[in-house]
Amino acid sequence: QFMASFDSKYGGFGNKPKFPSPHNFSLLLRSYQRDKKDATLKMVEKSLKEMRKGGIYDQVGFGFHRYSTDEHWLLPHFEKMLYDQAMLIIAYTEAYQVTEDPFYKEVVEEIIEYIKRDMTSPEGGFYSAEDADSDGVEGKFYVWTREEIIEILGKEDGEFYAKVYNIEAKGNFTDEATGHKTKDNIPHLKAQFFELASAYKMKRPDFKDKVYTLRKKLFLVRERRIHPLKDDKILTDWNGLMITALAKAGAALQNEDYIEMAEKAADFVLKTLRNKKGRLLKRYRKGKAGLTAHLEDYAFVTWGLIELYQASFKSKYLKDAVSLTDIMIKHFYDNKKGGFFMTADDSEKLFIRSKEIYDGAIPSGNSVACLTLQQLSQLTGNPVYLKFSEGILKAFSKEVERYPRGFSQLMIGLDYATGPSYEIVISGDPEKDDTKAMIKAIQKKFIPGKVIILRPAEDNKEIIALAPYLKDQKMKDKKATAYVCQNFACKQPVTSVKELLKNLGRE
């Protein structure tokens, strides 16, 4: 289904309008990991590169707009959504892990720069969206005339920037309503930086430095314009996705700042968007939290906490993931037919409690829960969680068989269930280099079916209480020791990174 609808010229799937749909790429990367079909990886790489070059990407201030109105990613609907940034951070991070191409790492860093600068509240939570229009005109904040570019950057630099970013005197896109060009331009690239650098006979770092110096000048001028309205609600579910993304990026890119951003957001959600009974609330704005949480709030925050535990190894996050999952099972699970309802059993009584499974612009709560329940079972050693994950897969199997492409995130859960999946226990002193080297070696790799648990040599009571099987997985010869297990049957413990990767088939 993906191959049939893939746009080999511009990347992405289907015709206009084109949505990024990042979970499609995450699924395809897992498929590539299994069968190593170059065509599968090519679909992901082509799409992610074309999107970054296009007008759907804010070339001046970073971050992705919501969707493209055309097939070549030029003219976007200019709204920016938090959930898109989160899911795209995950897709580009995973592409970096698979290919080790620094291009993907740079995109992750740019999106997070945008999130940190424009979408993070003083308390550490993340705002929901930025509108498409400012001063009553869609895209006005983001477009430029050629004259403006020359005036701001000077003739020589202005013409250089205009050539690189395809800025034209008559404008580079047609107005959707009139079909005419309006002198306005959306900065976009027709080639990657390394190709452009070669065309300009410059070294790539020099070319990039020059372009980014000019970009910064335009950005500072743009900051003085009337900004699009910011939707400053802090939504629990979307924050869960961003915590997930930052934790994954922080671990894969070895960036402590990203992990700290995720921690601050998680601490805010757990403190402010949870009531005295430990139940989540749905939204927060200007000091007030409220509304009953739905399934996706629990599933997405749990996902974030599980990834954050595996990035920070602070057992409190795993503990909170367990307590939120237990609440989710108690109040949302359908014990008769399997799967989770959208609403809790004690929320406002509706005629029908519906279940959502379709993975649209954001994944469904059931799809994410299918994954987190498996991860939690591995992390804690509690097989009960697997029963509920299997219940989701059974409950929705017929829909998925009919149209798998509509359930990309659920298919990621199915891929996880298919295996191989690994429990990787690192037993050692978290401050010592040998422990850090083992953790880093695993975090940098794309190993979709793994969980990683740290058993500190000391101060380990809390993590052993959460995962009792860790009790006997101790250090050998006072060295950091790795236990690679499948379904809790462990290979011989090893004390070198090389042996660890060999045990994972990732030499």
Image: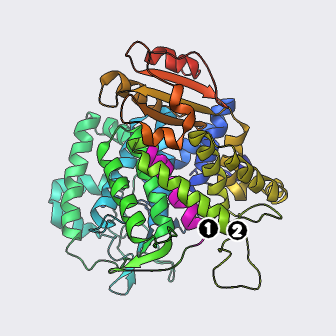
Q: Secondary structure at mark 2?
A: loop
Q: Is residue 421 above or below residue 184?
A: above
Instruction: Name the residue rendered at 34%, 64% in the picture.
Output: 168
User: Which residue occupies 30% across, 59% down?
Assistant: 116
Residue 441 appears at what percent x and percent y?
A: 43, 26
Reading the image, the residue beneath label 2 is 356
Task: Give the x, y percent position of residue 88.
Answer: 48, 54
Residue in front for this viewpoint, 77 or 464: 464
Of the image marks 2 and 1, the number of the one nearer the N terminus = 1
Nearer to me, 24 or 103: 24
Q: CA–CA distance between discs 2 and 1?
A: 9 Å
Looking at the image, can residue 269 be seen?
A: yes
Residue drawn at x 36%, y 57% is: 166
Amino acid on which the number 2 mark rests in the picture: Glu
The answer to which quarter of the image holds residue 456 is: top left
Pinpoint residue 135: horizontal percent, then vertical percent: 32, 86
Q: For the magenta stretch, what is the residue range? A: 294-309
Residue to which mark 1 is pinned: 295
Instruction: For residue 192, say whether it is visible.
Output: no
In this view, 502 is above or below 104: above
Residue 369 - label: none
Q: Residue 311, how many percent across, how many down?
A: 41, 42
Between marks 2 and 1 in the image, the one whose residue lies nearer the viewer: 1
- Given residues 146 and 97, the one toward you in this image is 97
114 sits to left or right of 416: left
215 or 163: nearer the viewer: 215
Q: Residues within 10 Å of mark 2 (few under 14, many from 20)?
A: some
Residue 166 relative to residue 15: left or right: left
Residue 488 within the magenta-colored segment of the rendering: no
Given contact means CB atoms under 8 Å apart, are the residues at marks 2 and 1 in contact?
A: yes
> What is the three-letter code of the residue carrying label 1?
Leu
